[in-house]
Amino acid sequence: MPCLGFGTWKLRGNECVESIDFAIRNGYRHVDTAQIYENEAEVGDGIKKSGVARSDIFLTTKVWRDPFASGNVMKSVDESLKKLKTDYVDLLLVHWPFPETPIAKMVEEVMKAQEAGKAKLIGVSNFNISQMTEALKVSDGKICVNQVEYHPYLSQKPVLEFIQKNKMVLTAYSPVARGKVIKDGALKEIGMKYGKNAGQVALRWLTQQDNVAAIPKSATPENIKANISIFDFELTAEEMKKIHALASEDGRQVNPDFAPVWDRAA
């Protein structure tokens, strides 16, 4: 899985198609979507328009709560594949630990999709440590990714340490804190040293950590190109530490009423 991917939350219609096409033509080979984003068809169109072989794209989608509750997960996965214009996804995630459905049942359902060849890899999203522990046990270690909110203002130290210990990957969504990092003085100062903007510094900070990938989203060509231009510099240990120090107790931005009890850094 490429450590820098293209997120598609809130991208719809032709804007989504064009953004995916532009991103792939500018080097992205990792694309992330979800059933609830209601843009899988456009993502599929964008990949096809790019002309890049499907086998060269790492494609992720996520199963929403309704198919788990109704027992129609495989049907929903087939619908996702049809929209995405592909026979498989590279990674299929349980989108949230939905409280009305046992974790074991959700994990077993995505395992069935993997066993049927509809997903090469399986994982979860927004799971805490206790839930990841159960998911790993149920799947016999096949759960390999946890996609969570992660950016300079939110410490995910407990989750990341668990993921690293278990040889999983943490995929960071909202990696630039929905644009908040752009105006950050500390990040801008570090960026000046390398000729980079604050967003690029945040993305480099994430991808420079072991077992971390990031999926920034943008519909602006300039930002799409900038977000992937982060592999020609390396932050120092002191700079990494300085960025870690930006985290705060109220840094989380995504916290719906059905969210789990989050693990907090000591």
Image (cartoon, rainbow, N blue to C red):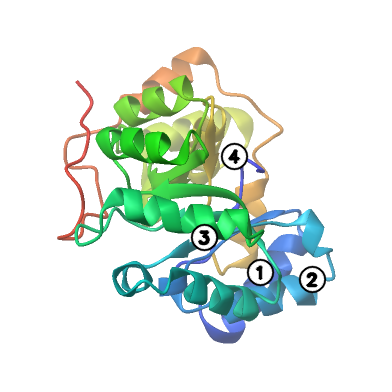
Q: Secondary structure at mark 4?
A: loop
Residue 217's disc is 3
Q: Please name the residue that numbered disc 1 is placed on.
A: 20
Q: Mark 3 against mark 4, which lies toward the viewer? A: 3
Please determine whether, in this image, residue 2 is positioned above or below residue 27: above
- Mark 3 vs 1, N-terminal side: 1
| Residue nearest the viewer, comparing 173 with 71 | 71
- Mark 3 vs 4, N-terminal side: 4
* Residue type pointed to by label 1: Ile
* Residue type pointed to by label 4: Lys
Q: Secondary structure at mark 1?
A: helix
Q: Please name the residue that numbered disc 2 is placed on.
A: 50
Q: CA distance from mark 2 to mark 1?
A: 8 Å
Q: CA distance from mark 4 to mark 2?
A: 27 Å
Residue 12's disc is none
Q: Secondary structure at mark 3?
A: loop
Can residue 195 be seen here? The reply is yes
Q: Mark 2 against mark 3, which lies toward the viewer? A: 2
Residue 244 at what x, y percent from top left?
Answer: 36, 26
Residue shown at 50% from the left, 14% from the top? 237
* Residue type pointed to by label 3: Lys
Question: In which image quadrant can residue 45 be found?
Answer: bottom right
Q: Residues within 10 Å of mark 4 (few under 14, many from 20)?
A: some
Residue shown at 40% from the left, 18% from the top? 241
Residue furthest to the top in view is 237
Q: Secondary structure at mark 2?
A: helix
* Residue type pointed to by label 2: Ser
Residue shown at 69% from the left, 35% from the top? 231
Q: Mark 4 against mark 1, which lies toward the viewer? A: 1
